[in-house]
Structure formats: C-alpha cells, structure tokens
Image (spheres, rainbow, N blue to C red):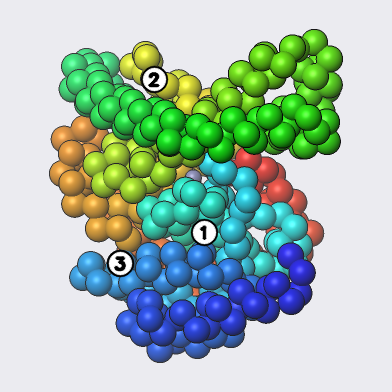
Amino acid sequence: MEKNEKNNLANVAKRNLFISNYSLLPKNMKIYIQNNIQNMDYKSLKTFVDVLISGYKNGDPATIKIVENFHKIDSVLKIILQDSLTPRSSKFLDLNRIKNNGFVAILNEIGGNEGIFAHELGHALLTIVDGINMPEEFSHIIFEIKESWSKNPQKLESFLQEARNYQENIYEKAKKDTEKIMEYNKADIESFIEKNLSDQNLLRKTLEQFYEKNKVDEIIKSSNTNQIKNIIMTSYRNEWGNHHFEELCNSDETMQIYQVLCGIIDSIYTGDNPYYTSIYDNGFLRTHPSSYFHKFPTNSFNEQFADYTRIKFCNMKVVIEIGKVLLGEAWFFMMETKFQQIANQLEQKTFGYDFDQGIQTQKFLEETFKNIK
Ligand SMILES: [Zn+2]
C-alpha cells in the first residue's frame, strides 16, 4: 500500500473512531490504538474494537481482564491490522510482518465479521501469551469425546445433519438471489459481454479474473462466440453466487453457531470426520483439510482454542449450551482453564513466548505458522 493511501485510511479511521465502540474501551487500549493507528486499516480496526467491546460487555472476568490488559502485548509485538484482498481467507500471522517484529490480523473483504476476528484473536493470544502449551489432559479429553461419539453416533450425526440442512437452505437462497440479480441486470451484462467479444484485451482481462493465462488462451482459441458468452456468464454467476453465499453465512447468527461447533468437531477429528458425508465442498462447515492438522501436532488444539475465544468474546451462549451436550463439560473446563490462565499471564505480562531468541523464534514461527489459517 502506498504511504499516502495508508495515511488517508488512518485519517478516516481516526475520524470514525469516535462514533464506534471506541469510546467504551479502557483508557490503556485507547492509547494503544492511537499509538498504532498507522498500522491499521479502518475496517479491521473497527472489527477489532467491536470484538474487544463485545468481550468487555459480556461480564466474564477473564474476558474483561484480557481486554483491559491487551495493550501489554505492545511490549513484545506491534499489532498490525489490515485487509486481505483474498476472499475466503483470514489468518492472524503474516511472516513478512513478523520479520519486522509485528503480527497481523487479516480479514477478508467479505468474511471480515467479528466472529472470524475473535477466532484469529484466539490464535494470537495462545501463541504470544501462552507460547502454545497444550494442556496435559488435552489428548485424553479428545479421546474420550471420540469414544462417546463412536458409541453413540446418533447424537453427532443428527447435529451435523441439522447443520448441513441449514447451510443448504442458505446456499439455495444465495443461488436464487444471484439469479434474480442476473435477471435484473440482464441488459447490462449482455452489453458487457458484447463489448468483451469485440475487444480482445478486455476479453482477456475479464477471463483472467477467473482463469490462469494458459487456460484463457485455450478458451479464446477453441471456443466460439456463444461458448465464450456462456463461459463469462457462468463465471460471473458462480463468483457472485459464492460471494453472496459467504455474505449470507457470515451475517446469519444461527449459521455462526453451526460454524463454530462444526469447526470444533472438525479439529477434534483433525479434518477426518467420519460422519461428514454430503457436505458441500464450498461450504462453511468445514475448516481445514487433514493435511493441515497433521502438519503440526498443536494445530488441533490451536484451532479449538481459537473457537473457544470466539465463543467467549462473542458471548455465544447457545454454542455453550449445545456444546456441553455434544462435547461434554470436561472440554469446556479445559478451555476455560487455559483462557483464564492466559488472561492472568497477560495481566502480569509474563509471555510464554520467548521473543528475545531472534533467529530461533523466527524459525519456530515459520515452522508453526506456515499453514495457519
Ligand atoms: Zn484458525
């Protein structure tokens, strides 16, 4: 990003801060944000503040402690918040930034909701404050949960079925909406396609939004006018449909509940859930492939803790209710213990992560977060 552009964003952010939740933040957090505002874009900053305030207002002592002490992270790392232009991905660490002694919370342009942000915040807390120390009882508790599901799969299966049906309805709605939008804009779309067909450069540019250069060459060489028309039409239909589907999922409260619980279940099975059968490939109930979970032994716990942080900061009471039935009390007790421990460590500024180790730290981070999302 150009320096000027960055300054402009920072100015917009400054102006808008006073009409957001910002005024409710503890004083130290306000100072912290003011000191770091050059590193933050407005949308991410607003989401960050909203998440902190949502946690601050939920009345839970550990969450409040984290909000009140979050600025202490500044002593070890600068926080950098920025948009990612890649749809459908959000992550909290960016290796280039770590090299400059900073960490990043990245949100995608559509998916940047508070829940996703809170999840990434969980990764950040676990890594920076805790140094990713898995609780001793973790593997035992996971083993017990899987045992109880395999003995009585019906409970889990019916939950997953419910989640799938819910997602399917949203998917159908997204498809219908998209058709309506296409129908409504038919004349514009058709004249745009006609323009494409008479201008090779424009046609290339349009197709390159969706396909690799080689594939674009192939399409242009081997398709007739009608086929090209269809290809452009279908590409836009899919693109808009997927975006709209994501938008609907991210703004639907019930879907958020399913998403968090399915994310936890996914992590428990390290991506190999035997009860997922007809899930959409492009759905939001799946999080990471098994290769991701097998890459690093702490990834499963890391994802579950990130989801727990989301439950806490977004005050997801229904998730706790359903979760206690599905996962049992022990899982919640373990996560809460870790959450409280992190809140205390943050308060005392005892970071589990050794930031002075220089190269060793860098290597560890690169290994650990090569694939964290
Ligand atoms: Zn994650």
Q: Is residue 117 above or below residue 247?
A: below
Q: Callout 3: helix, strand or loop?
A: helix
Q: Which residue is mark 1?
A: 124
Mark found first going from the N terminus, 3 or 1 = 3
Residue drawn where x is 50% and y is 88% of the image: 31
Q: Which residue is mark 3?
A: 54
Label 3 and label 2: CA atoms lie apart by: 32 Å
Amino acid on which the number 3 mark rests in the picture: Ser
Badge 2: residue crowd in 10 Å (few <14, some 14–19, many ≥20): some
Determine the image quadrant of residue 362. Answer: bottom right
Label 2 and label 1: CA atoms lie apart by: 30 Å
Q: In this orientation, does residue 297 appear?
A: no
Q: Is residue 284 left or right of residue 219?
A: left
Q: In this orientation, does residue 2 appear?
A: yes
Q: Is residue 304 above or below residue 109?
A: above
Residue drawn where x is 64% and y is 26% of the image: 232
Residue drawn where x is 39% and y is 57% of the image: 114
Q: Which mark is residue 279?
A: 2
Mark found first going from the N terminus, 3 or 2 = 3
Badge 3: residue crowd in 10 Å (few <14, some 14–19, many ≥20): many
